[in-house]
Image: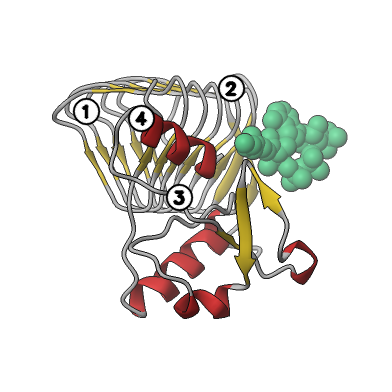
Amino acid sequence: MVADVLSRMRGAGAAVTPVGYLDDNPALAGQSLLGLPVLGATVHLDTFAHDALIVAIGDNATRQHLFETLQSRGEHFVVARHPSAVVAPDVRIGLGSMICAGVVVNPGSIVGANVILNTGCTIDHHNHIDNHVHIAPGVHLGGDVSIGEGTLVGIGATVMPRRRIGDWSVVGAGALVRTDLPDGVVAVGVPARIVRNLVAEG
Ligand SMILES: CC(C)(COP(=O)(O)OP(=O)(O)OC[C@H]1O[C@@H](n2cnc3c(N)ncnc32)[C@H](O)[C@@H]1OP(=O)(O)O)[C@@H](O)C(=O)NCCC(=O)NCCS
């Protein structure tokens, strides 16, 4: 998906030239996808000319780990923003983030680094989306919502205006979040109820 977004950005006139993928699965080396080659494993990164990267991994903790490891090695990141996304001009988006097709981000919102705003989600005004978050396809966040670091808001969920969701939590697919949620919980249903405490589980 990241390669598709970058290619479409290039097609729309952005100064972006995707060169290929790195993947630690040796079986993928030499294969190609969307016309771009799998260049090798992440340890081979230094052998390929590049200006910037995007970590294209869905799992938030894994994506955070790789992002921070690469950042500490001095790597640079860009934002992959699909040309069909509608993002208000004052919205700040952190590096390494991916904004997919059909996303809407309204004025006053802040989107952190290494975030995924997946297909067709809507982020209303004055949201604060922290680093390493994944907002899944078709999610709707009301105005003035805050999503803590590393949290996954599952496909099709709705978060009512002014609600706060803590760090490293999971909102189940299709949930309706009516009350604030703390750090490290799994909440599902309509209305959403906490069913697991990930902090207690370690
Ligand atoms: C909430 C979630 C994380 C739970 O996953 P899990 O811990 O593996 O839980 P299980 O699938 O074993 O289900 C446990 C229970 O919760 C229920 N449940 C799971 N997901 C649910 C959901 N989204 N809404 C309501 N109930 C749900 C199950 O029916 C099951 O109930 P039971 O114990 O009465 O049988 C997962 O189901 C989910 O919704 N993930 C979001 C995925 C997503 O949107 N990813 C983004 C893709 S781009």
Measure the C-alpha gap from mark 4 to mark 1.
12 Å
Numbered tag placed on residue 126 in the rendering: 1
Name the amino acid, label 1. Answer: His
Q: Residue at x 44, y 31 (%)?
A: 8
**Neighbourhood count class around disc 4 (C-alpha, 10 Å): few under 14, some 14–19, many 20 upward:** some
Image quarter for ligand 1: top right
Considering every residue shown, the one lying at the far right of the view is 27
Secondary structure under the numbered disc 2 in the rendered image: loop
- Give the residue displayed 28% in from the left and 43% down from the top: 15
With respect to residue 81, does 102 lie above or below?
above
Quadrant of the snapshot with the N terminus: top right
Vertical arrangement, residue 93 with respect to residue 100, above or below: below
Cα separation, mark 2 vs mark 3, equals 30 Å
Residue 60 lies, in percent from the top left, at: 53, 54
Please tell me the numbered disc located at residue 163.
4
Q: Mark 2 — residue? A: 156
Q: Residue at x 46, y 37 (%)?
A: 7
State if disc 1 and disc 4 touch (CB < 8 Å): no
Query: Which-is-in-front pick, marks 2 and 3?
Result: 3
Q: Nearer the viewer, residue 5 or 59?
A: 5
Residue 106 appears left or right of 202: left
